[in-house]
Image: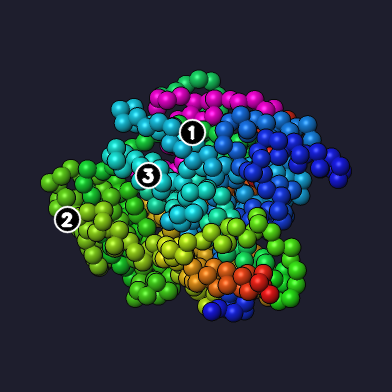
Amino acid sequence: MSQGRGGDVIRELEAVFKDRLFTEPHILALYSHDASSEVGVKPMAVVQPVSVDEVVKVVKLAIDHGFKIVPVGSSTSLSGNATPKLENTVIVSLERMNSIIEVSDIDWYARVQPGIKVDELNLELMGYGLQWPVDPASSKTATVGGVISNGGGGMRGAKYGPASHWVLGLEAVIGTGDVVRVGCRTVKCREGYNLVQLFIGSEGTLGVITEATLRLAPLPESFVGIMARFGNAESLVNAVIKVRRDRLWPMVTEFVDDKTAQLLSLEPRYYLWIGGVDTYAGSEQGVLTKLSNAIALNGGEIIGKALTWQDFSKLLEPRKMLYSAQLKAAFGDYGMDAFLLIEDIAVPMSKLPEAVRELQELSKKHGVKMMLGGHIGDGNLHPAVWARRSDKDEVERIMRFFEDVGSLAIRLNGTVSAEHGIGTQKKELLKGGAIGSRNNGRSDLVIELMRNIKRAFDPYGIFNPGKIFD
Amino acid sequence: MMSIKEIHEEVKKCMYCGFCEFPCPTFNALRSRAYGPRGRINLIKALIENGFGQGKDVGLNSDVINPIMTCLHCAACDTQCPAGIRIADVIHGFKAIILETILK
């Protein structure tokens, strides 16, 4: 884009957005990366729309002037989804579109703007006895629009599944500047191709989501939970399998390994948090006994029992400190030169003991420091590794570990990305490993289908270029 | 008062998770990244790394000063930070350095 043309663009953006347009370099830098280690570039401008009409206007300007758009919420991606890679980018920040438009406590849906944070929404929904049960660890800050675009999940995923289970309909501005409304307000909705699901996990490459109709669930009437520890991963997984065989369906099933436990100030054992089993008032003790038996039968030691969500939250404190502990470990070892990478794979539950064992072996093989925790109830593991940024050899070992972890997930019939997305960091793993392995090496077949879908939504190639695939 | 060096050591710890924004009264009033703790900390980091307070003119302007100077120092953000950054102290210390620099 020429300098003169660039000046025109800024003037036209200013006419629409006024004091919600930013071109000051320090402010632009705040939108030049996300929470991943991916390095981005300063965009040429940031705009903060407050209506769908303003989003349409910025998309039409992008078509006319040839700039790119990266839609962002809170930029908490751990895969580089929200990191701009080209200078001729305008960041469309949805942070000011943060209203709850409607809550139906009969039809169990909520219509919201994309910039509302997940915890803000759930605090409001508690008043209705309802929840949007998608709770990434970043739920305090992650926006609903960001979680949908990223296909996020969380601790409650074992029971409720990720975002793809909890979105009924969407309004979005696509790359022609048109507004589309897809999906329904009913759980059953069979209106041709399911375009709602195409947007979920599309990482801002198909359009800008401007409104979401979310499916809601009732908050449990009562609650039980347990924290326990085991001598090895196999026993822990067997206890969880026994719970499933007993037809109990916990909301939260989390674990950390022995080395991670030490960093959380716990004895070096394998720890399990299991809770949120649906009970009716009065049946708590019976359910708790079943859970306790499943743990005891597999050699587990119960550390704490909870009969309310508040008490279970206290038991969960060490698990909630996992991210802090990862940061402390990385900074403790390398100070400000620390480079932290948090992986995100999922394997079928039956393969979890094998996955945990092999991850520990891989960390030894590559000589990298690893903390291991995750959402064991849905097979989602988050090995975290760190290196000294200035130590090329150590960073390379981390990257080789990263690739091997992806290969391990594929070999165990799992996935290279459970809930963090592809972004820029996992493009090669997606293409070469995950998709290729399921298509006799013909990843091009499936990637081309994705490219054609992108072209249909975004014919001018405006949205978040370079993400998911090239 | 914290020195530029001490402030820089703190702000460099930011991993950009954004947890600090949730309880921030100014972020919630204005819903703009610069007006939350994450934005302020990273503005301060960039200014220091560009030489601010060390004799270099970084072209300070209201787009950058206003977000920093509007922090209320309630310290609600401090308890949220997984990296343990002393956010309120850092911003307070940097405000003093801004005033010192401007009044010189």
Badge 2 marks a residue whose secondary structure is helix
* Element carrying mark 3: helix
User: Please, which chain is the residue tagged with disc 2 on?
Assistant: A
Q: What's the image's color scheme?
A: rainbow
As measured in the structure, the alpha-carbon distance from the residue carrying label 1 to the one carrying label 2 is 41 Å
Q: Quadrant of residue A325?
A: bottom left
Q: Real-space Cα distance between discs 2 and 3? A: 30 Å
Q: Which residue is mark 2?
A: A289
Residue B83 rendering spot, x and y as whole percentages: 50, 69
Horizontal side of A70 relative to A303 (left or right) equals right
As drawn, the residue found furthest toward the front would be B103
Kindly identify which numbered label has been placed on residue A122: 3
Quadrant for the C terminus of chain A in the image: top right
Span colored in magenta: A159-187
User: How many numbered circles are shown?
Assistant: 3
**Residue A160 on the magenta span:** yes
Residue A97, above or below B92: above
Q: Is residue A465 magenta?
A: no
Question: Which residue is the site of mark 1?
Answer: A212
Q: CA separation, marks 3 and 1? A: 15 Å
Of marks 2 and 3, which one's residue comes earlier in the chain? 3
Residue A21 in the figure: left or right of residue B21? right
Q: What type is the residue that disc 3 sits on?
A: Asn
* Residue A46 position in % (x across, y down): 67, 46
